[in-house]
Amino acid sequence: MQSIPAATVARLPVYLRCLNDLPSEKTTISSDELADLARVNSAKLRKDLSYLGSYGTRGVGYDVDHLRAQIGLELGLARTWRVAIVGTGNLGRALAGYKGFTDRGFDIEGLFDDDPKKIGKKIVGRTIEPLADLDSAVAERKISIGLIATPAAAAQEVADRLVAAGVSSILNFAPIVLSVPDGIEVRRVDLSVELQILSHYMQRQLLPRDMAN
Amino acid sequence: MQSIPAATVARLPVYLRCLNDLPSEKTTISSDELADLARVNSAKLRKDLSYLGSYGTRGVGYDVDHLRAQIGLELGLARTWRVAIVGTGNLGRALAGYKGFTDRGFDIEGLFDDDPKKIGKKIVGRTIEPLADLDSAVAERKISIGLIATPAAAAQEVADRLVAAGVSSILNFAPIVLSVPDGIEVRRVDLSVELQILSHYMQRQLLPRDMAN
DNA sequence: GTGTGTGAAACTTTTCACAGCA
DNA sequence: TGCTGTGAAAAGTTTCACACAC
């Protein structure tokens, strides 16, 4: 019942999604079946779930509804979290329109940009506000998550302001390593890093192509 | 000189970016300085770089240009890779317009969608093609990386077709766990998974807020 | 029989600490 | 003296394999 390993935390959302995608007549699932859907080893899955204290039934499997509820609780999805998106370029707009947020209890409570031409325009029904209002809006609306979708050059300043205004987590899409105080959780989503990792592994495949065919 | 640990591979692109962001008059950098920029422990950085065989100079540090070149080589950036984007919704459009790709040797050689209303339209100068042409285009244009930006329901089929047509890596933005043959590298970029991970850690902070202030 | 929960083993990754080179 | 390169220790993660509950 201590703190759950980071590797496990990162997989819980995947398990949850697999459970949500199950046909509704399925009320029970074994670790083998779920592991297969999530593409992980079943012993790993069982160990992950054991950290939740969520008991399965030996010889049967896990109760789907109960498991969903347990994972949701552990991921803090019982409540809603208020989110601000900073930067409304292509990516910011894609984020603002992403269905998967509201569904899972993440409410977008603010869209900010510093381009005067964009301010006042609407994206999916929400008006873009000036960056100057970011600090007060975060504080007043009790926003706790900031998504940074600005160019790299602006990202650190935005992060500083988000933190100062009271945000406790940041999801950073800008291609830069942010520096934040201890206790602020930052996750980075970086397209070109991902591509470069792929590129490394592709290069390694070089000669031993499909020789074992 | 054996295969580099996965954890190291995932950090190399970050080091490379930090090096690229350095002012041009900086010709030499110590592990402490670079580790600070990349926000990692300096022993870890040195160990990571030691896998490249890239020698620094004791008492001095690493030659910036040489290090850049070594990391680029290891990441397969000496050549260009041809990329197809499948799905041209908000996210697909954001990807198509992302500057960081072309810069680093990833050339977008095809945009595909199955919506007849979108086919023939242009995004950043490139015409959207029908999904039916995906297979032949991948093969003919020697595309080796596919970016999947479709809804979840379409993603697996698109992945199957990409693989059959000869792609060797996939970057998947659809919220689903793809199943692909051995030897095909897949990386997932999943916004709602990232948010749920943040949510978990935010929840854990609960009471011991700013008590040590 | 079936499938969970979990110790113990194997492996990976991180961090420490320092010898040794410029 | 300053900073790299790296063994060795520590920490974290995965996998195995099986006792045991249903």
Image (cartoon, coloured by chain):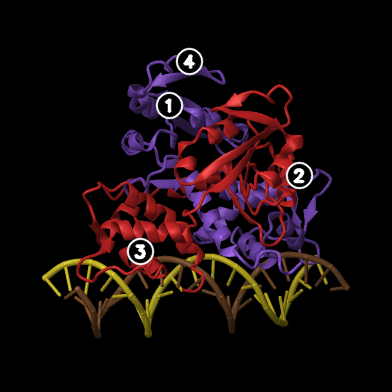
Chain colours: A red, B purple, C yellow, D brown
- Residue A157 is labelled as 2
The residue at 55%/49% (across/down) is A81
Q: On what subunit does the disc labeled 3 rest? A: A
Question: Closest to the observer: B153 or C19?
Answer: B153
Give the foreground label among 3 and 1. 3
Within-10-Å neighbours for mark 1: few <14, some 14–19, many 20+: few
| Closer to the camera in the image, B113 or A28 | A28
- Using the numbered discs, state the Cα–Cα distance from disc 4 to disc 1 in whole angstroms: 20 Å
User: At label 2, which amino acid type do we have?
Assistant: Glu
- Do the CB atoms of the residues marked 1 and 2 lie less than 8 Å apart? no
In the image, is residue A69 above or below residue A111? below
**Three-letter code, disc 3:** Leu
Mark drawn on residue B121: 4
Instruction: State the image coordinates of residue D22 (x, y, percent, origin top left).
Output: 19, 73
Q: Give the Cα distance between marks 1 and 2.
A: 42 Å
Q: Earlier in the sequence, mark 4 or mark 1?
A: 4
**Chain name for mark 2:** A
Q: Horizontal placement of A25 versus A89: left or right?
A: left
